[in-house]
Image: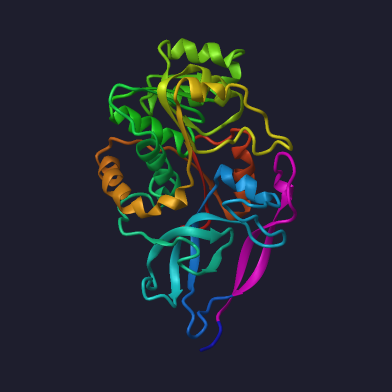
Amino acid sequence: MAEEMMNNKQIILKHYVEGYPKESDMEFKNSIIKLNVPEGSNVVVLKNLYLSCDPYMRSRMKNLEDSYVESFTPGYPITGCGVAKVLKSGDSNFQEGDLVWGMIGWEEYSIVTPIQSFLFKIHDKNVPLSYYTGILGMPGITAYVGFYEVCSPKKGETVFVSAASGAVGQLVGQFAKMLGCYVVGSAGTKQKVDMLKSKFGFDEAFNYKEEQDLDAALKRYFSDGIDIYFDNVGGKMFDAVLVNMKLHGRIAMCGMISQYNLKKTEGVHNLLCLIAKRICMKGFIVSDHFHLYPKYLEMIIPQIKGGNIVYVEDIAEGLENAPKALVGLFYGRNVGKQVVMVSRE
């Protein structure tokens, strides 16, 4: 078989990063790729369509040890969740023309092993394909597992969501409202706070940057305390929440974006509340729960098509704009789920 050689634009990590990431930590580079499946191989050749920008990717820019996720390799393409089209396949579960989502390179074309890349075939195409980087992809099942499986919510409970306008938070809030909970979210701009209430249906929301006293802010919205906290930020907000939890409250530890760029992470002072209030706090990694993905789709797709769930995306066009989009996450520039469109097919 003749080898098919193609130009392949890529986003390369130049070096490990300290402090806040910069666009200059990454390089837009052109390379050559062979779009072939070696005989006897089970790899899949992909044309990449959409890339997902996610906060956890910041930790992969460090030289990690004993982590649940591997570091990026300097000099090689960044990897992350994305949507792609199968061009060629050595795996009988995937055929030419299939649309898939999973872990792919930040490049125009990728060659992956389906099992290692957590590759899922896309069956329902009557929704925007970009949704498979968000509500129908990793952030969606993260919100589902963290809220329903970790927090075991009940109708009428009080729920607080930090980073509530992001890819995961906007869904957690809507899931809680569907269940009949009282929901408050925090975000970092007036636009995002307004969106939480007007678009996503949160009962209340506040701009944490305008609050001098987070404890007082939480008491303003939760006079009787918080049953469930879905934590995406960690740090000072987490510390303030501990004091305001109810007896037997539940905390889902999903992310800690406030800590990712610090050389030395902040300490927590109110952990005694876990004992005194009998709080159940649990961290979780979404890849441990991918077996629930079909169950999640059964729940969420009818809600999307019925107009009961709203999902907001912030789409940057062009692979060359991916570094700016990723860096923007850590400055709160994105409004909704940050996506990069590589190709329209």
Say if residue 207 shows up in the picture.
no
Q: Is residue 19 magenta?
A: yes
Q: Which residue range is magenta in the image?
A: 4-33
Tell me the residue at 56%/63% (across/down): 108
Above or below — where is 95 with respect to 148? below
Q: Position of residue 313 (x, y in %)?
A: 46, 40
Q: Is residue 52 magenta?
A: no
- Point out the image quarter for the C terminus: bottom left
| Left or right of residue 225: residue 213 | right
Q: Position of residue 159 (x, y in %)?
A: 40, 24
Q: Position of residue 125 (x, y in %)?
A: 32, 56
Choose top left, top right, bottom left or bottom right for residue 11: bottom right
Who is closer to the viewer here, 72 or 24?
A: 72
Tell me the residue at 57%/51% (across/down): 68
| Left or right of residue 225: residue 35 | right
Tell me the residue at 29%/46% (across/down): 301
Who is closer to the viewer here, 141 or 88?
A: 141
Say if residue 305 shows up in the picture.
yes
Q: How many marks?
A: 0
Q: Position of residue 90 (x, y in %)?
A: 44, 78
| Left or right of residue 170: residue 266 | right
Tell me the residue at 59%/34% (across/down): 333
Who is closer to the viewer here, 325 or 163?
A: 163
Above or below — where is 57 with respect to 101? above
